[in-house]
Image (cartoon, helix red, strand yellow):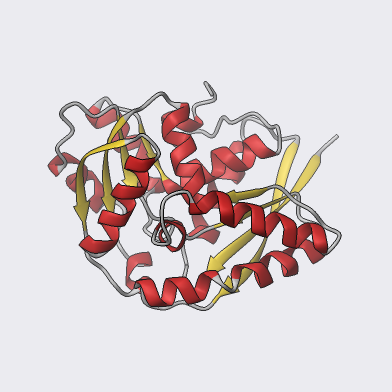
């Protein structure tokens, strides 16, 4: 008997990647678990430019999105903007997840909440990595916020590359194959893993397995971590083909 799960996605209005990569991974998973299928349901928060002012204003809209998605009685909700959480200070993902959970409960449709920020931290910890090298599309001050957030969670960032793309639509148009060269340029000496995209809007899925095979280190992203956490919240097997170490089914 096939079991279907409804996945609610809370996304920035200009995000074009979350609704591409998350479904791609969960649909690829159906190759190994054809008895478990997924549908995807989105609600959007207005945001065009990746700066602290727009990110904070956008985050205030997340409660509305959670309530809207709880109308559809989703089985899990994923808040898909890592930097909107991290720019508000270390540990904010826990506050956000709790608020969103209360919002769904108040609407009679309580669902477990996943944030891409919290999921990335948990993904790194799950594979046993304590030191990472990361690639972000952000301006350097925002990348520094990501580094501080990870450091506070006990994760050391060995090196980072900031692609410095401020327009969120342009972030979504970046060629993921370019990440192969960027990963070659990263200082990985002493790193336990590489975060190929510390942003769910920067496409990376087509390059993750290639880079992992190339560099011989575990490779993950904000998006693969979000999928891992979605599956974990649903108490499902976490094997997704060709999506890197975290989704190998070992964890």
Image-based side of 214 in relation to 94, left or right = left
Name the quadrant of the N terminus: top right
Left or right of 117: which side holds 167?
left
Q: Nearer the viewer, residue 82 or 230?
A: 82
Residue 228 x/y as whole percent: 55, 38
Residue depicted at x 32% and y 44%: 196
Residue 71's place in the image compared with 46, above or below, is above
To which quarter of the image does residue 10 belong? Answer: bottom right
Q: Kindly indicate the quadrant of the structure image that contains residue 232.
A: top right
Q: Count up the numbered dots.
A: 0
Note whether 151 is above or below 98 in the view shown: above
Residue for point 51% across, 74% down: 58
Residue 220: percent from left, percent from top: 39, 38
For the point 60% across and 49% down, the residue is: 114
Quadrant of the image for the C terminus?
top right
Above or below, comparing residue 52 to residue 143 in the picture: below
Give x and y (percent) for residue 172. Answer: 38, 66
Residue drawn at x 33%, y 52% is 146
The image shows residue 99 at horizontal and vertical percentages of 65, 58
Q: Is residue 133 left or right of residue 236?
A: left
């Amino acid at each position: 008997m096939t079991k279907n799960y409804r996945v609610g996605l809370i996304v920035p209005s200009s995000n074009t990647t979350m609704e591409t990569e998350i479904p791609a991974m969960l649909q690829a998973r159906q190759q190994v678990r054809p008895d478990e299928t997924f549908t995807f349901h989105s609600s959007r928060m207005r945001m065009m430019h990746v700066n602290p002012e727009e990110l904070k204003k956008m985050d205030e809209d997340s409660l509305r999105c959670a309530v809207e998605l709880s109308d559809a009685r989703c089985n899990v909700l994923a808040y898909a903007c890592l930097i909107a959480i991290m720019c508000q200070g270390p540990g904010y993902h826990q506050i956000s997840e709790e608020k969103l959970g209360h919002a769904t409960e108040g609407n009679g449709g309580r669902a477990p909440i996943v944030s891409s920020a919290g999921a990335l931290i948990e993904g790194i910890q799950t594979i046993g990595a304590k030191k990472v090298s990361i690639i972000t599309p952000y301006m350097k001050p925002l990348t520094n916020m990501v580094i501080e957030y990870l450091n506070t969670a006990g994760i050391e960032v060995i090196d980072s590359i900031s692609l410095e793309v401020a327009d969120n639509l342009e972030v979504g148009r970046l060629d993921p194959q370019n990440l192969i060269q960027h990963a070659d340029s990263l200082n990985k000496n002493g790193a336990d893993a590489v975060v190929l995209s510390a942003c769910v809007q920067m496409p990376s899925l087509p390059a993750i397995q290639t880079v992992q095979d190339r560099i011989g280190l575990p490779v993950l992203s904000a998006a693969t971590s979000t999928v891992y956490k979605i599956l974990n919240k649903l108490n499902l097997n976490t094997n997704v083909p060709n999506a890197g170490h975290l989704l190998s089914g070992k964890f």
